[in-house]
């Protein structure tokens, strides 16, 4: 019960922080402009109609519904899993991070038609595509699930 509650708290916190940070960027930045913070990191206001790394962003618009459906479907599956199974605290937080990130990006897609990205890492001519808090939470959540799975499988072997 406690672990399930931690998953939901994690999801709500990520959604709040993700949507709040995107709102702040939209109010203070012009689309396409970047504001260097360090020589290798900038804040930028980018509109991503595709998936991760702007995959399928140049499509005529079908991807909006497609990616929204995937995010909502994954969210429903996570909620069902959390209800039916007891996960470790680490796995529960990981699932909560994925849930909050998926919902944050789905809300963007439904309300705006695109996802707001604003974290941009770059070194000279090399750069990583811009991303947001939701993307970071999804990645961290997946890493926590992998770590928990690897650690628990090692523990059960001994």
Image: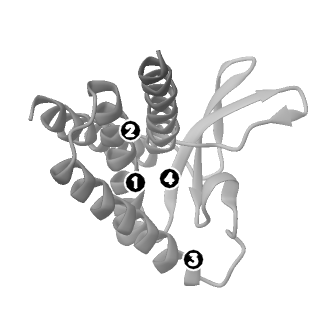
**Among the two numbered marks 1 and 4 on one chain, the one whose residue lies closer to the N terminus:** 1
- Residue under numbered circle 3: 63
Instruction: Residue 20: give x, y in percent of width and height.
Output: 31, 41
**Among the two numbered marks 2 and 1 on one chain, the one whose residue lies closer to the N terminus:** 2
Instruction: Residue 146: give x, y in percent of width and height.
Output: 51, 33
- Residue under numbered circle 1: 102
- Calculate the distance from the C-alpha at mark 3 to the C-alpha at mark 1: 15 Å
Q: Residues within 10 Å of mark 4 (few under 14, many from 20)?
A: many
Whether pointer 3 and pointer 4 mark residues with C-beta atoms closer than 8 Å, the reply is no
Residue at image x 43%, y 18%?
Answer: 155
In the image, taking residue 17 as reference, residue 113 lies left or right, namely right
- Calculate the distance from the C-alpha at mark 4 to the C-alpha at mark 2: 10 Å
Residue at image x 87%, y 33%?
Answer: 126
Q: Residues within 10 Å of mark 1 (few under 14, many from 20)?
A: many
In the image, taking residue 60 as reference, residue 88 lies left or right, namely left
Q: Is label 3 in a helix, a strand or a loop?
A: helix
- Residue under numbered circle 4: 116
**Among the two numbered marks 3 and 1 on one chain, the one whose residue lies closer to the N terminus:** 3
């Amino acid at each position: 019960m406690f672990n399930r509650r931690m998953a939901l708290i994690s999801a709500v916190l990520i959604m709040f922080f993700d949507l709040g940070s995107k709102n702040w960027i939209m109010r203070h930045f012009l689309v396409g402009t970047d504001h260097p913070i360090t020589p290798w990191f900038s804040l930028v206001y980018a509109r991503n109609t595709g998936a991760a790394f702007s995959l399928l962003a140049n499509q005529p618009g079908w991807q909006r519904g497609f990616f929204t459906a995937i995010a909502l479907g994954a969210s429903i599956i996570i909620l069902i899993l959390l209800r039916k199974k007891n996960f470790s605290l680490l796995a529960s937080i990981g699932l909560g991070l994925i849930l909050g990130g998926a919902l944050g990006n789905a809300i963007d897609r439904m309300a705006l038609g695109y996802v707001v990205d604003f974290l941009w890492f770059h070194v000279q001519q090399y750069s990583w595509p811009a991303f947001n808090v939701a993307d970071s939470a999804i990645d961290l959540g997946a890493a926590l699930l992998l770590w928990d799975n690897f650690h628990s499988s090692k523990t059960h072997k001994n």
